[in-house]
Amino acid sequence: MEMSASFNFQGLTPDNIWDALVKIGFYPESGLTELNSYENRVFQFIDEHRQRYVVKFYRPQRWSYEQIKEEHEFVLALKEAEVSVAAPLMINSETVHLSDGGFYFAIFPSIGGRAYETDNLFQLEEVGRTLGCIHQIGRKKSYEYRPTVSTAEYLIAPKLEFESSALIPNNLKPQFIEVIDKLIHDVRPKIEDSAWQILRLHGDCHPGNILWRDEVVMVDFDDSRMGPAVQDFWMLLNGSRQEQVIQLDTILESYYEYQDFDLRELSLIEPLRAMRMVHYLAWVLKRWNDPAFPRAFVWFQEQDFWFKQLALFKGQVEQLNEPPLQLSPMY
């Protein structure tokens, strides 16, 4: 399969979307309702049989065919193991399709549900159980084509993006680069320690990627990659340190039904947080030529925003030197 040379979605018109769906046997009766997604383009529709589906068009030049296929194979393995996930549909013996405009796309069932409640310990317990199942299967094989969580992707490449960006005020840029260098210096030896066992992960396990339908449903494995297990935990923790300890206890109590967990990985929480903070900013800057991004992130053009980011990054440098989160004594 060959994909579009364009990095954006300029060629993805309603007619292109319609033709792509018809090409694989879907005939929408409803209009296409665009769902919230900046990285990809995702639409919900109802077909001629009154069934509701979601079609996802992947951003060109982000993932190769092989990388998308690997993600789909992982999610389908989870579904086969009766883990509640939003899995792509197999159509004509394939889950990854190519539109005439050169966009990879996939069809998913439309899954309804309530928002995951971050302060609901019962739901959090179910999340821990689900992650235990996901990681149990994630350890059975490694990704061949998808990347591993690394400082190269999450810190060093973003630094280059910051250096070339015209959005960061010139009077702040030297300080900004200096604090990024400090984060790289402090984070790299912790993340690159060969002691960590890595596995296939969800990769972006935050509350927005969890639905509740009397059970947990995990959605959007688009950022799935190899990495330490704690990568799928730390974004679920919020509030005071004491509240985070209770939340972590709750996750691991049910997680241990399926998997062991190396408690030393708790020392990676703040390094991983630093990496995500830096990578997120660079992601927006990298996508700035996509018209959707200046509209959605107008504050990136304000100097006050960059002052605040500089302060946050300096605070994260200090946080890296604090003792890591620890579980209650029962562990």
Image (cartoon, grey):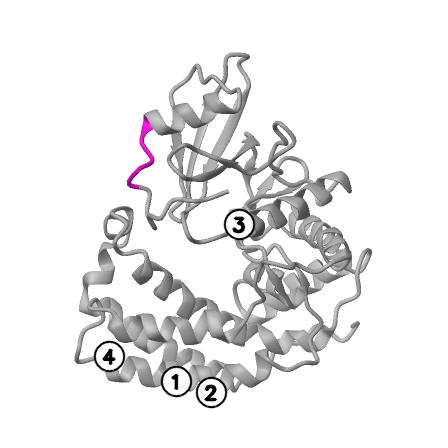
Mark 3 residue type: Asp
N-terminal-most mark, 2 or 4: 4
Front residue of 141/177: it is 141
Residue at horizontal 24 percent and vertical 69 percent from the top: 165
Mark 2 highlights which residue? 185
N-terminal-most mark, 4 or 3: 4
Mark 4 highlights which residue? 173
Q: Is residue 29 above or below residue 330?
A: above
Q: Residues within 10 Å of mark 2 (few under 14, many from 20)?
A: few
Label 2, label 4: how many angstroms apart (C-alpha)? 18 Å
Q: Are marks 1 and 3 in contact (CB under 8 Å)?
A: no
| Left or right, 94 with reference to 187 | right
Q: Residues within 10 Å of mark 4 (few under 14, many from 20)?
A: some
Front residue of 144/38: it is 144
Q: Is residue 290 visible?
A: yes
Label 1, label 2: how many angstroms apart (C-alpha)? 6 Å
Label 4, label 3: how many angstroms apart (C-alpha)? 32 Å
In the rendered image, residue 157 lying in the magenta stretch gets the answer no
In magenta, the rendered stretch is 10-14
Q: Nearer the viewer, mark 4 or mark 3?
A: 3
| Left or right, 286 with reference to 85 | left
Q: Are marks 1 and 4 in contact (CB under 8 Å)?
A: no
Mark 2 residue type: His
Mark 1 highlights which residue? 181
Label 2, label 3: how many angstroms apart (C-alpha)? 29 Å
N-terminal-most mark, 2 or 3: 2
Identify the element where label 3 is drawn. loop
Mark 3 highlights which residue? 222
Mark 1 residue type: Asp
